[in-house]
Image: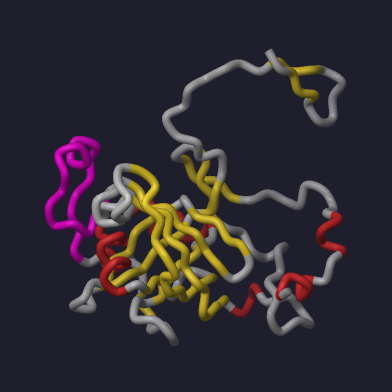
Amino acid sequence: MSTCTDLGTSEVAQHSVIDPAILYFGTPVALLATVDEAGHPNLAPNSSIWWLGQTAVVGIAARSQTARNLLAVRECVINLPSVMEVDAVDRLALTTGRTSVSERKSRAGYRHVHDKFAAAGLSAAAADRVAPPRVAECPVNLEGRVRTLHPLRGAADPTAADLLAVELDIVRVHIHEHLRLAGHENRIDPDRWRPLMMSFQRYFGLGTEAHPSLLSTIDEDWYRG
């Protein structure tokens, strides 16, 4: 059995082996806006997302309406809510854009909703470079185009897999003005940005800065490469 020293104490905690059904140890919540081939928008909560440089990687269920739209139109807006929008996000938690709700999802409480923006009480705003709309209330909107889709489970064909990891090239970033770091044209103030987070199916927000970071001594523009 392995051990680990708990930070700030001299006690050593012991590990136990478990088999959790999910591994959501804490990730940002996003509202993924997509459109189908007829231009009808869908808005779906998501908390399987990460970024590297100007690329976002999003994990989605391959049979979802979001996946169908991404396969057809290959564009998306990643809308990042703050803790202030948690009620709107939660109103979409058990909804699906699919007109046919699977028996498994139906038993869990999911229902079909045609107009997700109306159901959530959110406003659609036009994007600059992609077809799907932005969510006006979300402090951050990231317009993206699909670079590639990776089947994760079930089959090599994205249309037959169970899960997809979708690479998106971010082509435009919108923020609410109050998030801009004073004195900088293209930076976000982390003291003002309070993203909505999900940890094991529950919503959380960020607290205050835990510790000064050595990484913060590097000028942010260094990451442009």
- Name the image quarter holding the C terminus: bottom right
Camera-side residue of 154 and 218: 154
Camera-side residue of 90 and 155: 155
Q: How many marks?
A: 0
Tell whether 131 sits left or right of 224: left
Tell whether 24 sits left or right of 177: left
Colour scheme in the image? Answer: secondary structure
Q: Is residue 105 magenta?
A: yes
Q: Quadrant of residue 215?
A: bottom right
Q: Residue at x 41, y 70 (%)?
A: 146
Camera-side residue of 110 and 63: 63
Residue extending furthest top?
Answer: 1
Q: Is residue 42 magenta?
A: no
Q: Position of residue 147 (x, y in %)?
A: 44, 70
Please tell me whether residue 43 is drawn above or below residue 46 in the rendered image: below
Q: Position of residue 34 (x, y in %)?
A: 33, 69
Residue extending furthest front?
Answer: 156
Tell whether 138 sits left or right of 184: left
Q: Residue at x 23, y 72 (%)?
A: 36
Please tell me whether residue 6 is drawn above or below residue 217 in the rendered image: above
Q: Residue at x 46, y 73 (%)?
A: 144
Please tell me whether residue 155 is drawn above or below residue 184 in the rendered image: above
Q: Position of residue 76 (x, y in %)?
A: 39, 71
Q: Quadrant of residue 109?
A: top left
Q: Residue at x 72, y 62 (%)?
A: 191
Camera-side residue of 76 and 97: 76
Q: Position of residue 65 (x, y in %)?
A: 25, 59
Residue extending furthest bottom?
Answer: 128
Q: Which residues are magenta?
A: 95-114
- Name the image quarter holding the N terminus: top right
